[in-house]
Amino acid sequence: MKNIVVLVSGGGTNLQALIDAEHRGEIPNGKITCVISSKADAYALERAKQNNIKTCVLVRKDYADIAAYSRAMVEALQAENADLVIYAGFMTILDEQVTNAFPYKMMNVHPALIPSFCGKGYYGLRVHEEVLRRGVKVTGATVHFVTEVCDGGPIILQAAVPVLETDTPEILQRRVMEECEWKLLPKAAALFCDGKITVKDGKTHIES
Ligand code: GAR
């Protein structure tokens, strides 16, 4: 059984999707053992508590710099014996100490079809605002491994939805979450815990 640690910063609907999938038996070889939040008031922490999952708060401002914060994060993850670390709406960029300590053991869900609308500055609702501004007809979500390049790690799963003329950023965000993120993230976690994802030449291979 693999220990899954989930990193959050906000509402935690992706965390909820993971918890629900685990309860339905869809992540048979993984267990969410701890939720770490970068914000003390993140609603995601409530979701964890309601499900008797251990929580921890690590706030960037409490550390001198990103290196000290990243070191504290590595220590917290090692203390939890994390086998898989999932960024589920985690909004702080960590340095290479973290990616070096957990190579291809950290995954992130991004609310767009990488390599579009990604990288520094593209997070949360901003992504959907940019999608609407650019007028693309299709968007979606991507689950990828976290490397030292922001949103640049090997892609694990992607799914797409149409962009409609009547969409607001909020409506589009909801569609991307419901139809893409909440399905892809638990699926990627299950595949990882089943040992079905390998990485070669910067690309993933998923055993069927
Ligand atoms: C999700 O849409 C997630 O993809 C996005 O933030 C939202 C968090 O929602 N993450 C990023 O933009 C990371 N670059 P949640 O807290 O309800 O899961």
Image (cartoon, rainbow, N blue to C red):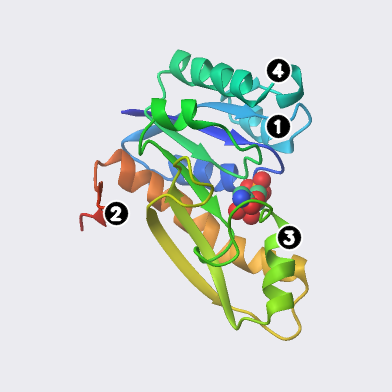
Reading the image, the residue beneath label 2 is 204
Q: Is residue 67 left or right of residue 2?
A: right
Q: Is residue 159 left or right of residue 190?
A: right
Q: Nearer the viewer, residue 59 or 118?
A: 118
Nearest to the eye among marks 4 and 2: give it: 4
Q: Is residue 13 visible?
A: no
- Mark 4 or 1, nearer chain start: 1
- Mark 3 or 2, nearer chain start: 3
- Mark 4 or 2, nearer chain start: 4
Q: How many marks?
A: 4
Question: Do callouts 1 and 3 mark residues in contact (Cβ within 8 Å)?
Answer: no
Q: Is residue 73 left or right of residue 187?
A: right
For mark 2, give the secondary structure: strand
Nearest to the eye among marks 1 and 3: give it: 3
Reading the image, the residue beneath label 4 is 63
Question: Do callouts 1 and 2 mark residues in contact (Cβ within 8 Å)?
Answer: no
Where the C terminus falls, by quadrant? bottom left
For mark 4, give the secondary structure: loop
Reading the image, the residue beneath label 3 is 126
Image location (x, y in percent) of residue 52:
58, 24
Label annotation for residue 46 = 1
Residue drawn at 68 percent across, 62 percent down: 127
- Mark 1 or 2, nearer chain start: 1
